[in-house]
Amino acid sequence: MTDASTHNTRALPPALCPKKQPRQTRAQVTFDAIVEASGQLLARSGYDALTTNHIAEVAGVSIGSLYEYFPNKQSIVATLIARITTQITREVSTSLRTALALPDQPRSGIDYWMRAMIQALEKQQTILRVALQEVPFLWDIPEVRNLSATLQHIASEGGHKSQNMVRFDDPEASTFLLMTMTWAAILQSVLYRPAHLSRERLTHTLVEMVLKLL
């Protein structure tokens, strides 16, 4: 898995690639400020209103410095979304390891992991909502395109470690379907939760549903 500060630009279309990656600390600070500023503006005003001039202003850098690293706003947003996706998958993986070490399995582990995944998405929910609704090249970003496979890999590792507690007739198919359904439910509940359904009510119900499927 890639570091949160970089992503695999080789698989990106040229227009979505940074011109270069920073090599020194000062350059990294500038690079990061540009990416973080794009996130603030994306959450505040949406993708269409985003401009490189606005990003440079919020980042506190010159427009020349911005163009030293990025050719356009698309490449900045692609870098931002790649970082966010990598961070989310890292948190999902780390929380699974913690969940598997808890007593009272599988209930305590499932409850902890579901809540951790929800929290990981909630931290980025505004940007994720904008990305899903407005960013036209979202699925060209490798971290997004490969997210399902990454989650399946994490879930498969967890399934292997918990095979003494949970048994399926077809572990591979069951893990794929359970992870796919659970992630879709979590994403929907975080981004588009109806006002009359509380987060706790949905989380509790999801945990109970998953336990019934095990």
Image: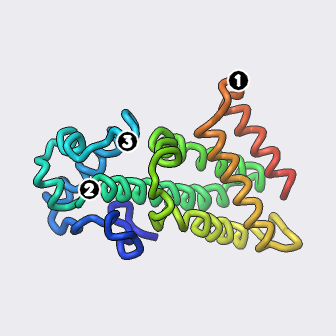
Q: Which mark is residue 204?
A: none
Q: Which mark is residue 48?
A: 3
Residue 67 at x, y percent in the picture: 17, 57
Which element carries disc 2, helix, strand or loop? loop
Q: Are marks 2 and 3 in contact (CB under 8 Å)?
A: no
Sooner in the amino-acid sequence: mark 2 or mark 1: 2
Q: Amino acid at mark 2?
A: Asn
* Above or below: residue 154 compared with residue 10: above
Q: Amino acid at mark 1?
A: His
Sooner in the amino-acid sequence: mark 3 or mark 1: 3
Is residue 113 rendered to the left or right of residue 35? right
At 37% across and 34% down in the image, what residue appears?
A: 45
Mark 2 — residue?
72
Which element carries disc 1, helix, strand or loop? loop
Q: Are marks 2 and 1 in contact (CB under 8 Å)?
A: no
Residue 166 at x, y percent in the picture: 82, 64
